[in-house]
Every structure is written in C-alpha cells, then in structure tokens.
Image (spheres, rainbow, N blue to C red):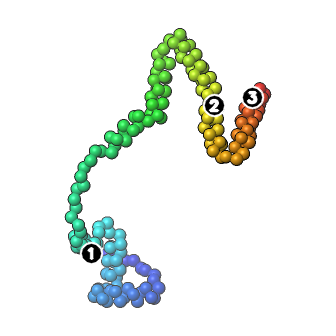
Amino acid sequence: MPQVSLYIDSDTLKKVEKRAQQDEISISKWVGECIKKSISDEYPESFLKLCGALKDIPFEIPPQGKFEGEQNMSKVFSSLPFRLIVALVIGIIAGLVANEAVMHVAVTLQSLVGELIFFCVPLIIIGFIAPSIARLGNNASKIFGIALLLAYVSSVGAAFMSMG
C-alpha cells in the first residue's frame, strides 16, 4: 500500500491523535478514512438516517386548473408586436411575389400614409401635452407658449441643418 507523509502543526496533530484514540484505531488509518470520506461520491450514512426521521404534513396534489401557457399564448397572438411582425412577413412575401405595377401602388400608399403620420404626430403630441400644461394652473399659458416656441425653433433649426 502506498505511503503519504503529512506536515501538520502540533495542535492539529494532538486533535488527530485524540480522535484516532477515541475511535480506537491508528492515526494512519483514521487519516485515511477521513480522506476517503471527503473524496467519496456517496452520501454519508448519517445523511441517509435522516431520511424519514421528521414528521411532515401529508403531500396533497393541488387542484389542477387550466395550463397557464395556453393563456399566455393567446396573449402573444393578440399582441401588437406579434401582429406587426406578421404584417412585416406578409409584406416581404407580397413584395417578392407581386409585379411592378402592384409595387408602385404599394409605394404610393406608403408615401401617403407616411405623410399623414408625419402631419398628425405633432398634433397628437400637442393634444396630449396641452391638457397636461393646462392642469398646471398659473402660468400655464406661458409654459405652453415656451413649449410651442421650442418645438417650432427645433423644427426650423433641423430643416436648416438638413440643407447643409
């Protein structure tokens, strides 16, 4: 059997000698068993003795309801991002299949809807911001005027900067 030399301090040696003496085995055998226990892949016997040692409440299966995944999937299919992705995929397929005349109509509609959205966005923003500013009470007209002036100056400044 192979031999191993260990270097340990005197306090640890005293503890090892005491434990080996209590177990009525040699120091070498006691250290070997400790090493075997520490590298073992199995649970110690003391752990297995604990199994079933404690009284516990009986296990009851809770009432089974509808699977939550079904409800979540219906929410996914009715969500706006899912609908946008489906519309995008349909548009790509239609663009690959459609002829040039149909694509001219689609591009014209895209341009018209884009201009309509571009026209409506500032009105929608003012529609949401104006009531909020009006609720401020005092100096609401000043704040609204400043916000409107900043928006106008920003738009005009962006137009001049884009001209280069």
Mark whose residue sits in front, 1 or 3 = 3
Residues at marks 2 and 1 touching, judged by CB atoms closer than 8 Å: no
Q: Position of residue 54 (x, y in %)?
A: 24, 72
Q: Quadrant of the N terminus?
A: bottom left
Mark whose residue sits in front, 2 or 3 = 2
Query: Residue 161's image quarter?
Result: top right
Give the mark nearest the N terminus, 2 or 3. 2
29 up-or-down from 90: above or below: below
- x 31%, y 77%: residue: 33
Circle 3: residue type: Ala
Q: Secondary structure at mark 1?
A: helix
Circle 1: residue type: Ser
Q: Position of residue 7 (x, y in %)?
A: 46, 81
- According to the picture, the residue beneath numbered tag 1 turns out to be 46
Q: Is residue 13 left or right of residue 143?
A: left
- In this rendered view, identify the residue nearer to me: 48 or 121: 121
97 up-or-down from 64: above or below: above
Q: Quadrant of the C terminus?
A: top right
**Distance CA(mark 2)–CA(mark 3):** 19 Å
Q: Residues within 10 Å of mark 1 (few under 14, many from 20)?
A: few
Q: Is residue 28 left or right of residue 54?
A: right
- According to the picture, the residue beneath numbered tag 2 turns out to be 123
**Distance CA(mark 1)–CA(mark 3):** 80 Å
Q: Is residue 21 left or right of residue 110?
A: left
